[in-house]
Image: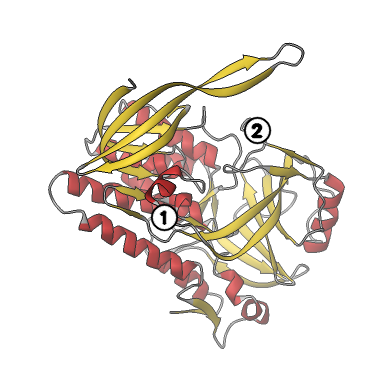
């Protein structure tokens, strides 16, 4: 018989969304079990920036100052048509507690959150995979598989993950932040359809050259977008939208220790092809990027789950939404969702509200994402919008580094209006 573990909340997934939800719940006095299929925090990831609203959420759990100290502040966004700047805007939101965007790699953020959880006595259960999920009245019963490495082979040695043990977790609530392949979402029978065309990007890290360290640059060219994010230590991240076969990949590999972004397989990119593409998109950047750390090809989908959960099982982060990468919206919205959902669960747990609070979470978050994905709204150019901005109004909806009301504020600074 599998072992039995009882808890108030089971959190599935130890990325930023799951970690913040677990931390918020543990600080409120809830018993939390946090499981993660991987064996450690992320090595590399695409997500690398925190909006002001996400920093507020970190401030609520006492981590904003540490995040700001470890990151790089961005104050401006500049828009280019490859060769010349066409528009610029200030990223500060009026009266905001954190009037900037903070560049902080996901691995550093996860480290802060995991350490804070451990200080509260709640350690991540690494190498634990959700296998089954069933709601039984006021209890959710989860079957969890503990994984371990097993080596084998005689002529050629190999290592694989196998199930070492199964345990059952009985929880009053489940927060599922287990990414785009979410087993919890599938267990609920919630569809996760594509709601827009996917995008493919060449992503590389290199020396920043002479580009300013306090601004994000977006290049809009022939319906494609490229983003230059400055990183700490005079490094930079380029994301160059592709139309095959602009860059031909020569190798696929998957490694959490080297180059892994999210949960997916990636092509490794030849340096010469990336340099040529970069020279076309941004001739003001060094034609031969120096000190290239890694370069991969990444496909980003646009998806929205048909529900954010039901009963006592609720979803957040990439388990319910995927979007384009330029505005770093998915992770930031996930952090906001994690904090909101944890607070609502705590109220229900304390008898201060019914499950309707969680249903309300689902409705509100779905509506917000239908707007950000352009399903129930769009950006339209006003009379003051520069020509480049007006031509790319629809594309900029996912490119501005903000969500919610802040997104409309930033759009207005380049002459765009949010039409609902």
Q: Residue furthest front?
A: 1
Instruction: Tell me which corner region of the image, top left, top right, bottom left or bottom right, holds residue 121.
Output: top left
Instruction: Tell me which corner region of the image, top left, top right, bottom left or bottom right, holds residue 124.
Output: top left
Q: Which residue is mark 2?
A: 255
Q: Taking the image as drawn, is residue 56 in sight?
A: no
Q: Residue furthest left?
A: 351
- Residue 247: percent from the left, percent from the top? 81, 54
Who is closer to the viewer here, 135 or 412? 135
Whole-number angstrom distance, CA of label 2 to CA of label 1: 30 Å
- Residue 93: percent from the left, percent from the top? 43, 65
Q: Residues within 10 Å of mark 2 (few under 14, many from 20)?
A: some
- Tell me what residue is drawn at x 38 percent, y 42 percent: 20
Q: Which of the two discs, 2 and 1, sits closer to the camera?
A: 1
Q: Taking the image as drawn, is residue 88 in sight?
A: yes
Q: Which residue is mark 1?
A: 190
Q: Residues within 10 Å of mark 1 (few under 14, many from 20)?
A: some
Who is closer to the viewer here, 169 or 52? 169
Q: How is the image coloured?
A: secondary structure
- Tell me what residue is drawn at x 65 percent, y 14 percent: 152
Element type at marker 2? loop
Who is closer to the viewer here, 131 or 108? 131
Picture layout, residue 218 above or below residue 109:
below
- Residue 265: percent from the left, percent from the top? 66, 42
- Tell me what residue is drawn at x 33 percent, y 59 percent: 362
- Tell me what residue is drawn at x 51 percent, y 49 percent: 180
- Tell me: 80 left or right of 57: right
The answer to which of marks 2 and 1 sits earlier in the sequence is 1
């Amino acid at each position: 018989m599998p072992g039995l573990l009882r808890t108030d909340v089971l959190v599935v997934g130890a990325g930023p969304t799951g970690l913040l939800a677990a931390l918020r719940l543990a600080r409120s006095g809830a018993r939390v079990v946090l499981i993660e299929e991987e064996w450690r925090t992320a090595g590399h990831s695409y997500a690398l920036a925190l909006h002001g609203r996400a920093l507020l959420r970190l401030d609520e759990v006492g981590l904003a100052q540490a995040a700001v100290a470890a990151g790089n502040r961005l104050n401006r966004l500049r828009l280019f048509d490859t060769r010349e700047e066409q528009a610029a805007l200030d990223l500060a939101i009026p009266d905001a507690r954190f009037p900037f965007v903070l560049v902080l790699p996901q691995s550093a953020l996860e480290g802060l959150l995991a350490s804070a959880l451990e200080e509260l006595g709640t350690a991540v259960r690494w190498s634990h995979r959700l296998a089954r999920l069933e709601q039984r009245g006021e209890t959710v019963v989860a079957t969890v598989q503990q994984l371990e490495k097993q080596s084998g082979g005689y002529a050629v040695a190999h290592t694989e993950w196998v199930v070492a043990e199964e345990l059952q977790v009985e929880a009053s609530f489940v927060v599922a932040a287990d990414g785009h392949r979410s087993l919890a979402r599938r267990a609920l029978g919630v569809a996760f359809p594509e709601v827009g065309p996917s995008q493919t990007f060449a992503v590389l890290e290199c020396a920043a050259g002479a580009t300013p360290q306090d601004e994000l640059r977006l290049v809009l060219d022939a319906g494609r977008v490229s983003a230059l994010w400055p990183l700490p230590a005079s490094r930079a991240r380029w994301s160059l939208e592709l139309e095959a076969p602009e860059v031909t990949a020569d190798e696929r590999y998957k490694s959490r220790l080297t180059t892994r972004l999210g949960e997916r397989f990636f092509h490794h990119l030849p340096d010469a092809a990336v340099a040529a593409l970069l020279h076309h998109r941004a001739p003001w950047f060094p034609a031969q990027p120096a000190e290239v750390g890694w370069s991969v090809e990444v496909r980003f989908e646009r998806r929205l789950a048909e529900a954010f959960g039901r009963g006592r099982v609720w979803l957040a982060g990439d388990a319910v939404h995927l979007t384009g990468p330029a505005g770093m919206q998915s992770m930031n919205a996930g952090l906001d969702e994690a904090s909101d959902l944890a607070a609502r669960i705590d109220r229900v747990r304390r008898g201060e509200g019914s499950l309707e609070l969680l249903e309300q979470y689902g409705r509100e978050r779905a509506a917000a994402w239908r707007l950000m994905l352009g399903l129930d709204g769009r950006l339209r150019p006003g009379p003051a919008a520069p020509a480049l901005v007006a031509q790319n109004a629809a594309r900029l909806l996912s490119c501005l580094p903000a969500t919610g009301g802040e997104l409309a504020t930033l759009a207005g600074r380049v002459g765009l209006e949010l039409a609902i």
